[in-house]
């Protein structure tokens, strides 16, 4: 999984605070970024846009900033926090321990342009793609969070949960 931003971010309880975006277009497709280990393009995965909270910004502000930096998409309706997840994974020579909040967002803007990537992101993010829930369910690629296809199907069938759902901790 990609760390998405500079190595040192504000931490709470030893965890990097992260905001992610479950971005849906008018056809209920989800936007995922394609990333890989900086020195090993074969070690790749798909993930939602997002990254670390900077300074005094809120997680919602971080979600919108990261979305703009990583995709160029700024015309969004940011909704509620859908899910919360803790994860730990190796990336770019170190271990990342994160507390991630996933915000629902909708947009009609589907063209992407990753114009605000950090140096690490430029070495590890290689594109973006809109996925239907059916494509995601059939995918053989690695996707984070690992239950994203199931979570997206529930979201599309039932709507957002009444409050954030805590997902299982993922340790890679």
Image: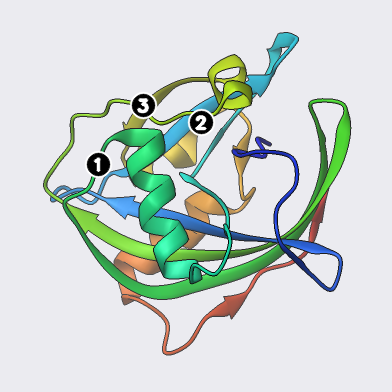
- Residue hosting label 2: 139
Tell me whether circle 3 and circle 1 mark residues in contact (CB < 8 Å). no
Could you tell me residue 59's position as x and y percent?
Answer: 50, 68
Look at the numbered disc 1 and give the secondary structure of its residue: loop
Instruction: Provide residue 30's location: percent of width, then percent of height.
Output: 34, 45
Q: Label 3: how many residues lie within 10 Å, few (<14), some (14-19) or many (20+)?
A: some
Q: Secondary structure at mark 3?
A: loop
Q: Kindly tell me whether residue 102 is visible in this rendering.
A: yes
- Residue 25 at what x, y percent from top left? 20, 48
Q: Is residue 30 above or below residue 124?
A: below
Point out the frontmost of discs 1 and 2. 1
Identified at 82% across, 42% down, the residue is: 89
- Which numbered tag is attached to residue 73? 1
Q: Which residue is mark 3?
A: 114
Neighbours of disc 2 within 10 Å: few (<14), some (14-19), many (20+): few
Q: Is residue 86 above or below residue 166?
A: above
> In the rendered structure, which disc, 1 or 2, sits on the residue that comes first in sequence?
1
167, above or below 31, in the image: below
């Amino acid at each position: 999984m990609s760390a998405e931003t500079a190595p040192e971010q504000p931490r709470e309880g030893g965890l990097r605070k992260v905001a992610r975006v479950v971005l849906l277009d008018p056809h209920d497709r989800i936007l995922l970024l394609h990333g890989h280990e900086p020195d090993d393009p074969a070690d790749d995965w798909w993930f939602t846009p997002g990254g670390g909270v900077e300074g005094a910004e809120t997680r919602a502000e971080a979600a919108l900033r990261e979305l703009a930096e990583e995709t160029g998409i700024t015309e969004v309706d940011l909704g509620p926090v859908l899910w919360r997840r803790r994860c730990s994974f190796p990336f770019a020579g170190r271990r990342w321990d994160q507390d991630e909040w996933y915000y629902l967002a909708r947009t009609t803007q589907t063209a992407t342009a990753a114009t605000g990537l950090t140096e690490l992101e430029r070495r590890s993010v290689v594109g973006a793609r809109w996925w239907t829930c059916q494509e995601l369910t059939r995918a053989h690629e690695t996707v984070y969070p690992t239950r994203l296809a199931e979570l997206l199907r529930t979201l599309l069938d039932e709507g957002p949960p009444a409050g954030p759902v805590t997902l299982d901790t993922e340790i890679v």
